[in-house]
Amino acid sequence: MWQKDILVLPDDLIAFAWSAPMRDLAAKLELSDVGLKKLLKRCGVASPPQGYWNKIRAGKRVPALPKAPPRRPGELGRASVDARFKKVLPIATPLPSNGPFASALVPEDLDELHAQELQAIGKVSVPQKLDRPHKGLVQMLKQEQRRRDKNAGREWTFDEPKFDNPLGKRRLKIFNALFSALSKRGHDGDAYEHDGEIHARAAIGDTYLGLDIGIAGSHRTVRQHGYLRPAPDLPASTPLALRIDPGFDRKNTVSWQDDGDAKLESRIAEIAAAIIVAGEKKFRLGLREAEERAERERIERRSSARNG
């Protein structure tokens, strides 16, 4: 029967990985040693180097047990592993919703976190071309190129490239710069196209946030394949707004927009730092929501037992 993964402390997982030869540990979990190594690697846990156990048996000096890296913004501070690890490791409780949340990489105060990330990101430029795209845009750009190749020379096509217009290219360049800035801090972002729209998100540690770049204010539209879309000949100077959508529901959003000569392109570092803070904030709020949900479920179970 399929079982949910469990959460364990990273240091506990490291201690287990270094407690015996991989083949012996894998047998305890009914896994292959190759499968266990892959799982540990996915959790960021390195297994002992080759020859480690021979040196132990020979009484030779070996490397010290590594320590788990400090929690980064948006991270659980826990490792998610196969439920079979319940046989060998205790299940870790989540961080308490009232903290402390601080680590060597995360200050307790979110304003301090923003200042820290802004300084670390530094200056960010938006390249004029997309010839070196961030990995989070590669698949979408390949899809666009396939459309160009397929429809080259045709007078009309149903599936033409979606973003071969000044404003579409500008939006992709902004996303590219933003994802690159997040990657500089160990985070990530990606995007895909659906029905002619860009759907994007940021991954801050273990926390995901929606991102959107749309036109600010009224603009000309055309109907394309049943959808109202911005007119393809709108100039690149058309004002744009970028929105962080933490819950992917357009609630509790934070946004920026072009303001005269101050374009979004000049605020990428500021926006990237704010996305990182939003990821950490969502993580902390999620802990509180999980505790409240658990308490409601506890009350409901007690009520059901009393009435049953």
Image (tube, grey):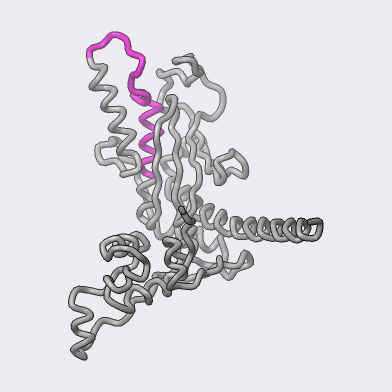
Looking at the image, residue 186 lies above or below residue 140:
below
Residue 166 part of the magenta segment: yes
Of residue 51 and residue 304, the one placed in the foreground of this image is: 304
* Quarter location, residue 177: top left
* Residue range of the region highlighted in magenta in the rendering: 153-178
Q: Quadrant of the C terminus?
A: bottom right
Residue at 49%, 62% (x, y): give it: 76
Residue at 50%, 42% (x, y): give it: 210
- The total number of labels drawn is 0
Of residue 141 and residue 277, the one placed in the foreground of this image is: 141
Looking at the image, residue 222 lies above or below residue 246:
above
Residue at 33%, 22% (x, y): give it: 161
Of residue 186 and residue 57, the one placed in the foreground of this image is: 57
Direction from residue 156 to residue 76 in the image, left or right: right
Place of residue 278 in the rendered image (x, y in percent of width and height, measured from the top left): 53, 52
Place of residue 111 in the rendered image (x, y in percent of width and height, measured from the top left): 56, 60
Looking at the image, residue 161 lies above or below residue 193:
above
Place of residue 133 in the rendered image (x, y in percent of width and height, measured from the top left): 29, 41
Place of residue 259 in the rendered image (x, y in percent of width and height, measured from the top left): 52, 36
Residue at 45%, 66% (x, y): give it: 71
Direction from residue 255 to residue 33 in the image, left or right: left
Looking at the image, residue 222 lies above or below residue 64:
above
